[in-house]
Amino acid sequence: MSKFFKGIKYFLIGLILFLLFGIAIYIIDVNVNAPEVKSSELETIERKVAGVDHYTLGENWLKKNEFGTWEMYLEGSAYDRGIAFGKLTKELHKEKEAAFIAEIGNRVPNDGFLTFLKYVVGWINRDLDDYIPEEYLKEIYGASKYMSDSFDYVGPKYNRILNYHAAHDIGHALQNMNLVGCTAFASWDEQSDDSLLLIGRNFDFYFGQQFAKDKIIAYYNPDKGYKFMSVTWACFSGVVSGMNEHGLTVTLNSAKSTIPLKGKTPVSIIARDILQYASTIEEAYEIANKYESFVSESFLIGSRKDKKVGLIEKTKDQTGLMMPDTSRMIVTNHFQGEGLVNLPENIEYRNEGVSDYRFERVELLMDSLKLLNPQDMALILRDRSGLNGDVLGMGNEKAVNQLIAHHSIIFSPYELTAWVATAPYSLGEFVEYDLNSIFNDVKNDRSNIDADPFLFSKEYTDYEYFLKIKERIQVFLSTGKNGELTNKEIERFIDSNDESFLTYYYLGDYYRASGDLSKAIETFKLGLHKNVARESEKRHMEEALSECLAAIEK
């Protein structure tokens, strides 16, 4: 055998050994070890059916209320809570995981890239368990034992559930996917009726219509720390919106981040630790400051003890606390504090034109309503209009209500009361939840806020159709599947939301991908005459239009 072929042979053997070694290192590095736990009596107890959509496990329970929202009570040690969470919600979690994985499939072009993405996320989050307190690891591990076997091809159950707790972070680190765009605001003293502290927020985390279903109002009675409520979903131990027994509230608002290269503590776990162990704004800040996060986030903290709110702003490198100098605070998706306001990524995001726009719209609404009560808070959360008479259409990111909210909530910390909107988005009836009625057995009648009349209008029915076709187009653009629209469908799609730039944005891309450049040109021109949300979306249409024109001229 010639020296050349021997050299090729040894090179290939070396390459194979290198690849095998790399795979072995990868598997070792991303392998997550389960926490050490003591056996739980709840592992041996069968879940009981107490009624229709009503389950119990010891003192823990899950039931669907008369408004169609799930409520859950968990107590005890971390592992006990996890076991109860997993057993009680196993069907809900299977549906949630199926929806999550299906939506990823809708957004990722092919199976090869999906596999690549899985390994990239696994590598980024390879040490995720090192950055999550042991208490929450035990709770998460307990829940993971009752996850469905159907998705084991994605990864081991415990690995999967840990990565799901970082999904919010990954989602808003990739903000060009427009997954997150929350709005929150608070008023107290002379800004509020009866001087009450009130906080409202839309949690605009959207990952498909199926993922938005079956939110859970969870009541935690842990063996350590404070009792609290949280608006969550099956087997998610993090917190994105919640209030504890001391009247301390936490809501998360994403901020522009650099792309993370290594996972640290998910912001929802930081918020969970604040809710379970803080009773004042200062205590909340101390907890947030001790963690390393891998994305930027704002934590709006309401406090009955402090009688106001504070804003914790956090990046991978800095944690700041901003205290208001008035009796109100508004938070959209940009940093406001002196230490972080001039960060390049913050300036870049503000230049997109959506965050400051929504901020100004909330400011205008609060000025016009004067003394705010819970009904006024709901009115603001449901607002779909633009500044100065701007016509936005439906689903525009400049609107307070973008019609994508996973949940919408109003807190009254003095009264330990919260109102959570029933589906869909912030449009359904805001149902009152009283922490005293759960934790102190004080019976109070619910005082709900009526559903938005928009929910029962033809315009909303049109929006549902718009959303269905928009998502079909998105799947087609990502995967090439399910793409052909009839002329009738296109006409109805345009009519369903004709004032929104999004209609022409997606339809223009559809025509372009289908090879109909003339119609793409016409559609992009129409879209550019609408109120476009982001500057990057405007640039996309302008560049696509130019490319289509150039292609036709050839």
Image (tube, grey):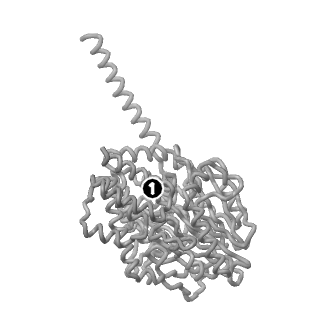
- The N terminus appears in which quarter of the rendering? top left
- Residue assigned mark 1: 177
Q: Amino acid at mark 1?
A: Met
Q: Which residue is farthest bottom?
A: 445
The mark total stands at 1
Q: Which residue is farthest top?
A: 2
Q: Residue at the spot x=52%, y=47% of the render?
A: 259
Vertical position of residue 539 compared to residue 253: above or below? above
Residue 185's x, y, as percent? 62, 70
Residue 452's x, y, as percent? 48, 82
Examine the rendering and report whether any part of residue 60 can be seen: no
Residue 39's x, y, as percent? 48, 59
- The C terminus appears in which quarter of the rendering? top left
Vertical position of residue 181 compared to residue 111: above or below? below
Examine the rendering and report whether any part of residue 34 can be seen: yes
Q: Residue at the spot x=41%, y=78% of the render?
A: 54
Q: Which residue is farthest right?
A: 325
Name the residue nearer the viewer: 235 or 332. Answer: 332
User: Viewed as shown, does residue 438 lie left or right of 404?
Assistant: right
Residue 404's x, y, as percent? 45, 68
Q: On the image, which quarter does residue 192 sit in?
A: bottom right
User: Viewed as shown, does residue 147 lie left or right of 426?
Assistant: left
Callout 1: few (<14), some (14-19), or many (20+) C-alpha neighbours within 10 Å? Answer: few
